[in-house]
Image: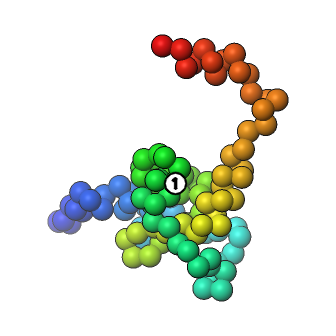
Amino acid sequence: MTRPRPRSVWPVCNMVESWSGRQGRPADRSEGPITVESMDASLLTAAEVADRLRVSTMTVYRLIRRGELPAVRIGRNYRVQAGDLEAYLVRQVVDPGSVDLETVLDDEKP
């Protein structure tokens, strides 16, 4: 019989299994392997990324799991390169001409 995982680690372990299909291994990346030379000097924790984006840490884990935000796995933790976070934000910029402001304003009314 296998022992249940500790609760504090469960969301991360569960994400790795569903993200890669192989427990404990990250998904294959089309950009190639991450090397020490390619890493930026500053690595951010999921909590630091969440603080900067003003979202929950679970939202950051979801972005990592979906492959929208590249991350490095170090032990049981994920780290996001500051450059990858900036690139993610650039990809999220919305063209003002493509947004229906009437719909947005209607959603904000109580």
Seen at 79% across and 37% down, the residue is 95
Where disc 1 sits, the SS reads helix
Say which residue label 1 marks: 52
Tell me where residue 110 appears, x and y as whole percent: 48, 13
In the image, 38: left or right of 26? right
Q: Position of residue 98 (x, y in %)?
A: 79, 29
Q: Which quarter of the rendering shows the N terminus?
A: bottom left
Please give left or right for residue 68 compared with residue 53 in the image.
Answer: right
Say which amino acid is labelled 1: Arg
Seen in the picture, residue 32 relative to 51 is either above or below; the reply is below
Is residue 36 at least partly visible in the picture?
yes
Residue 78 percent across, percent down from the top left: 46, 67
In the rendered image, the residue lying farthest to the bottom is: 37
Label 1 crowd bin: few (<14), some (14–19), many (20+), radius 10 Å: few
Residue at the spot 44% in from the left edge and 76% down from the top edge = 74
Q: Is residue 62 in view?
A: no
Q: Nearer the viewer, residue 100 or 52?
A: 52
On screen, 110 above or below 37?
Answer: above
User: Which one is in front, 63 or 6?
Assistant: 63
